Image: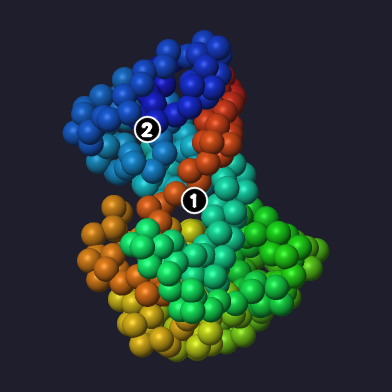
Amino acid sequence: MKILISDKLQDEGIKILEDNGFEVIKNFNITKEELKEEIGEYDGIVIRSRTKLTADILENAKNLKVIGRAGVGLDNIDRKKASELNIGVLNTPEAPAISVAELALGMMLALARKIAHADRTMHQGKWNKNEYLGFTLDGKKLGLLGFGNTAKHLAKISIAMGMSVGVYSRFSKGQVAIDEAKEVGCLIYPSVEDLLKNAQIISLHLPSTPQTENIINEDRIKLMRKDAIIINTARGNLIDEKALLKALKNKDIAGAALDVYREEPLKDQELINWDENLVLTPHIASQSIENQSAAATMIAKKMSDFLKKSK
């Protein structure tokens, strides 16, 4: 059986596939047109976020049995078409939890203590000590929208740092997530609005779905406290970026930190040029050595097991 790896995958993952007897073809820079033409040759494909498996590409995947996404989000795969064609879809939601949670925590600290802005001005030879009066995270109310693997880990480390944590999660895991949040020691908010009104720090941990798109919009931003900050390490379309930027400029909220965007790479010059109370990173939440290795080995094992059973 042949497996195409169309995005960068760590060697340890590739070795697992080869050791299981699969012919592995690596083409980390394959274009959409090339993929459309060649995908019919493969029994499996491993992707990350660069490769987009749209319906027109999958229509040509005559032999494809399984798609392996080394990561969490599946919004770059037309899952409806994959289901119609009886193509399995696998991912590794357990892999990046610690890495993403730690970046979210780092973003909180960067905003709370104005670290990013202070660093930039220091490199400009300025000593603006009196401009950087921040706040501590200890004692603050953290609100988590969603309670999957990443949010669960973030809740634990935030509670250990002295924060109180509240959760709203009725999107995917529902009651299971609520029960798990209670076990960790979290307050359960009855609605998104209640969370936004009360939390001083809001962190998003939701998938991209029609129900979650623009969950943070102009009306909901108006509910947030003036001292609130918002963190998004999940998916770019959860936030109305224009409404967020307006609120930041008007100081309707205290700050925001974004790792994901509606369009990537980020091209919105208004967002890029506004740095007073906004921290931006280029979708690096899962970019840790440990996570990349874990995602590669996990997806390779899942792919191997799936394809062996399909023989």
Q: Nearer the viewer, residue 171 or 192?
A: 192
Label 1, residues with CA under 10 Å away: few <14, some 14-19, many ≥20: many
Q: Are marks 2 and 1 in contact (CB under 8 Å)?
A: no
Relative image position of residue 38 (x, y in whole percent): 25, 24
Query: Could you say whether the residue bearing mark 1 is in a helix, strand or loop?
Result: loop
Q: Residue at x 50, y 13 (%)?
A: 18
Three-letter amino acid code of the residue under disc 2: Asp
Query: Relative to residue 200, is residue 205 depicted above or below?
Result: above
Q: Quadrant of the N terminus?
A: top left
Q: Nearer the viewer, residue 146 or 57?
A: 146
Q: Quadrant of residue 193?
A: bottom right
Q: In this rendering, would 251 be left or right of 202?
A: left
Tag 2 residue: 7
Query: Relative to residue 223, is residue 244 depicted above or below?
Result: above
Q: Nearer the viewer, residue 183 or 308?
A: 183
Query: Relative to residue 213, is residue 289 depicted above or below?
Result: above
Q: In this rendering, would 91 be left or right of 174?
A: left
Q: Residue at x 46, y 83 (%)?
A: 253
Three-letter amino acid code of the residue under disc 1: Ala
Q: Quadrant of residue 16?
A: top right
Q: Residue at x 64, y 74 (%)?
A: 136
Label 2, residues with CA under 10 Å away: few <14, some 14-19, many ≥20: many
Q: Can residue 279 be seen by looking at this rendering?
A: no
Relative image position of residue 214 (x, y in whole percent): 40, 72
Relative image position of residue 50 (x, y in whole percent): 34, 41
Mark whose residue sits in front, 2 or 1: 1
* First in residue order: circle 2 vs circle 1: 2
Q: Residue at x 34, y 83 (%)?
A: 249
Relative image position of residue 247 (x, y in whole percent): 38, 83
Tag 1 residue: 285
Q: Quadrant of residue 301?
A: top right
